[in-house]
Amino acid sequence: MKSIYLAGPEVFHADAFALGRAKQALCGAVGYVGLYPLDGAIEADATEPRDLARSIYRSNIGMIRAADAVIANLTPFRGPGADVGTVFEVGFAVALGKTVLGYRNVVGSYADRVRIWNGADFGGDADGRPTDRDGLLVEDFGFGDNLMIDAAITVFEHEAAASLTDLSGFTACLKRLQALLPP
Amino acid sequence: MKSIYLAGPEVFHADAFALGRAKQALCGAVGYVGLYPLDGAIEADATEPRDLARSIYRSNIGMIRAADAVIANLTPFRGPGADVGTVFEVGFAVALGKTVLGYRNVVGSYADRVRIWNGADFGGDADGRPTDRDGLLVEDFGFGDNLMIDAAITVFEHEAAASLTDLSGFTACLKRLQALLPP
């Protein structure tokens, strides 16, 4: 049975386990197995914080290697961009040639989101391109995040009230996956 | 001659080209070739913004595949974590088995940085773990960023006034690289 690694920052949510079960149920309903990071096996002797972190890392990487596909929640997290842990996993999976899809529970461009974060009008560089409060160029290709993410994979965007936990985008990814990589 | 892909958000700096040349000079001085993203070949017919973005993506990915190593500037960018474009590249390169090193021109833990971003005291979950203003768990393994980055690679940390552009951490990476992967 084909498996999907379920990447995303909902592992930090108070209902993290229930959210994973909900995704796994959606996967199971269409014939895939969902691999959820919090189900990983952590070495029992990993008690020191950094050892524990490395054990979690190895567990996640093992699940990505074992998976046929990855569906990633790329909703902005503590800033205008996606969760960096999730983005690392997306880059890792793309390099391995896995089928990778993403969703973002907000619409609008990355530049628009940086504008809000900026808290002031953009400046401009010598070529008239927008710059943020630190004088750094704001990329604006019409994508919802950095081009290394949105030029790499298809990202389904959808405005959701429950921005971190809404599963409409996840369901759209599952539907596309059934065409790309039938269960 | 072994080559190093020079990943980092200084491509968004007003002095982006000069910063790349400075890194390439440091690489050259110890026998490596530095591959800088802005030197990539962009397809001439890529004029529509998203086509241009995809062309840049392919160019960057091609350079990473060609490189023997990656040195990444992981200094926090528009929030408590690293630039997501750089993080994608790190994950991609780790998956390919490249030698990857990083630097961060600030010291302190990710949790400390989230505390500043939070703008208020942390809350606590049912297990007494810290939560941010959105009720989301703040991971605290003593690392300077998400464990998927800092458990994957060695990150040299250094407090620098010019947080985005200081090259002390880059020089430390180069020195370590000479031991790991002699030129």
Image (spheres, coloured by chain):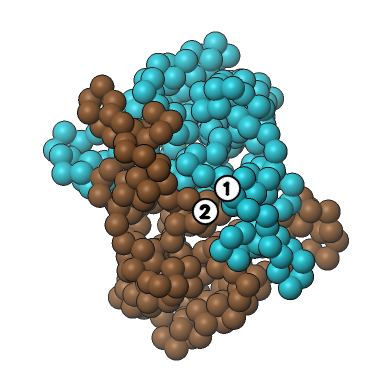
Chain colours: A cyan, B brown
Say what secondary structure mark 2 lies in: loop
Q: Position of residue B173 (x, y in %)?
A: 37, 72
Taking the spot 59% from the left edge, 50% from the top edge, the residue there is A119
Q: Nearer the viewer, residue A104 or A97?
A: A104
Query: The C terminus of chain A is located in which quarter?
Result: top right
Q: Position of residue B167 (x, y in %)?
A: 43, 76
Going by the image, does A144 lie left or right of B34? right
- Numbered disc in front, either 2 or 1: 1
Q: Nearer the viewer, residue B101 or A138?
A: A138
The answer to whether residue A152 shows anywhere in this view is no
| Residue on which disc 1 sits | A117
Q: Say whether marks 2 and 1 touch (CB < 8 Å).
A: yes
Amino acid type of disc 1? Trp
B82 is higher (above) or lower (below) than B25: above
| Residue on which disc 2 sits | B78
Tell me which chain the residue with mark 1 is part of: A
Q: Position of residue A140 (x, y in %)?
A: 71, 53
> What is the tally of numbered marks visible in this picture?
2
Taking the spot 52% from the left edge, 48% from the top edge, the residue there is A91
The answer to whether residue B53 shows anywhere in this view is yes
Say what secondary structure mark 1 lies in: helix
Amino acid type of disc 2? Arg
Taking the spot 60% from the left edge, 64% from the top edge, the residue there is A136
B106 is higher (above) or lower (below) than B140: below
Disc 1 crowd, CA 10 A, few/some/many (<14, 14-19, 20+): some
Q: Give me the disc on residue A135.
A: none
